[in-house]
Image (cartoon, rainbow, N blue to C red):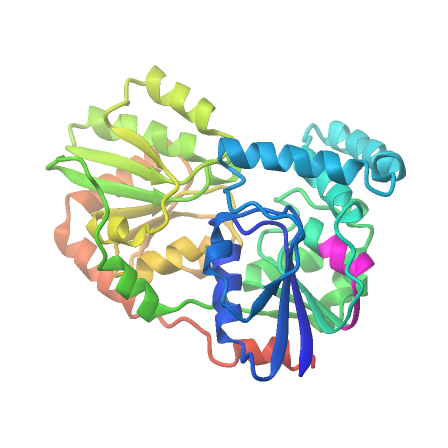
Amino acid sequence: MKEVLFVINTLGRAGAETALLELLNRMNPKEYHISLYVLMNQGEMVQELPQYVKLLNRHYAAVSVLSSEGQKVLRRQVLRAMFTRMTVIKCFPYIWKNLCAMLGERRVLPDKLLWRVLAEGGQRLDKHYDLAVAFLEGGSAYYVAEHVNADKKAAFIHVDYQKAGYTRALDRDCYIKYDRIFAVSGEVREAFLTVYPECGPRTDIFHNLLNRDKIYSKAKLSGGFEDTFAGQRILTVGRLTKQKAVEVSIEAMKLLKEAGLQAKWYVLGEGDQRSFLEERIRKLGLERDFILLGAVDNPYPYMVQADVYVHASRFEGKSIAIQEAQILGKAILVSDCSGNREQVEHNVDGVMCRLTPEEIAKEVGALLEDAEKRMRLGKAAALRKMTEEGELDKLLSLL
């Protein structure tokens, strides 16, 4: 039996975590002993782990990192990591150097600095593995590269590397230590290789794995919108972060309301931008029109009930939320950015537009007023081929 270790930053409800769970579900427990270490010791999706996956964390909280309780757990974890093996002293030159670089770029990203602290102060595993997989950028990539003993090592890249704020200085060139690197899309691969060109021969594309039957089944369960609104519904699923540009959608909703459309816009997800977005909603008088519903366990009934699905973000890797909406046959509008361009063909199986309130309002309004177009785009989206055959073999071939 081969020993395989997966490391991920958190098991919160997000795209990469969903992709990891599906990958784990497709691995044969008769051939592999599978272990998982979650660097931040938290995440509500732990309850969905296959029974044959061994969770290695000595301390674990099944709460979302985006919840108030999850934030308390995160603070405790950071403090624990800082004072384990004198990590705070060891990492101080690294933090100072990279903080100065961020200040020079006028783009300070505290989370990127903390990944090194969490990796250095993380739990040490005294076992040798045949294959170790870092399933996310940042902490898990640093941890596997420097603190795991394995014959082979693989890393996954889920975002536009530079736009997400990563640099070789932050990484300490950790990707040089990996035998194989998997990017979730062609654009993600290209962005990564502009920073690590020497990794080209061992950087491949690994498309997200999704379980269509599970999505169809969960879409039929009870749930979805609970209000009695009789107009049209617009839906977005995603974290409330700067990357997702929800404030631009709020501005677009203001324009749609001024145009007289009877519609409401709903967002499923949580994040550090909630207070800012709530203030923007109040300022524009959209409390009844743009509704932040928070994170939910099952977004699929909402997707089915929505008239239009919108994913207007600043950049993506390869959005699982878009893929899920496509599987459910929804009319989709996306912003013209990295990641999204590979997922939607304009006016064939969706609509693509610039990330401005005016463009988004124009295109969403046109979709809401054209039922035939929504149906045509939705049918084409449901028929879109999603490459999955042979994907798992790319990873397991390392063994």
Quadrant position of the C terminus in the picture: bottom right
Residue 293 lies left or right of residue 166; in this view the side is left
Please identify the dominant SS of the magenta region.
helix
Is there any visible trace of residue 345 in the rendered image? no
Task: Using the image, determine if residue 124 lies above or below residue 108.
Answer: below
Most extreme residue toward the front, as rendered?
58
Residue 87 lies left or right of residue 44; in this view the side is right
Residue 168 lies left or right of residue 135; in this view the side is right
Quadrant position of the N terminus in the picture: bottom right
Kindly identify the residue that appears in the image at 12 percent across and 35 percent down.
228
Q: Quadrant of residue 210?
A: bottom left
Q: Position of residue 393 (x, y in %)?
A: 58, 81
Q: Is residue 149 magenta?
A: yes
Is there any visible trace of residue 171 in the rendered image? yes
- Residues shaded magenta: 141-151
389 and 75: which is toward the camera = 75
56 and 147: which is toward the camera = 56
Kindly identify the residue that appears in the image at 45 percent across and 74 percent down.
387
Q: Is residue 273 magenta?
A: no
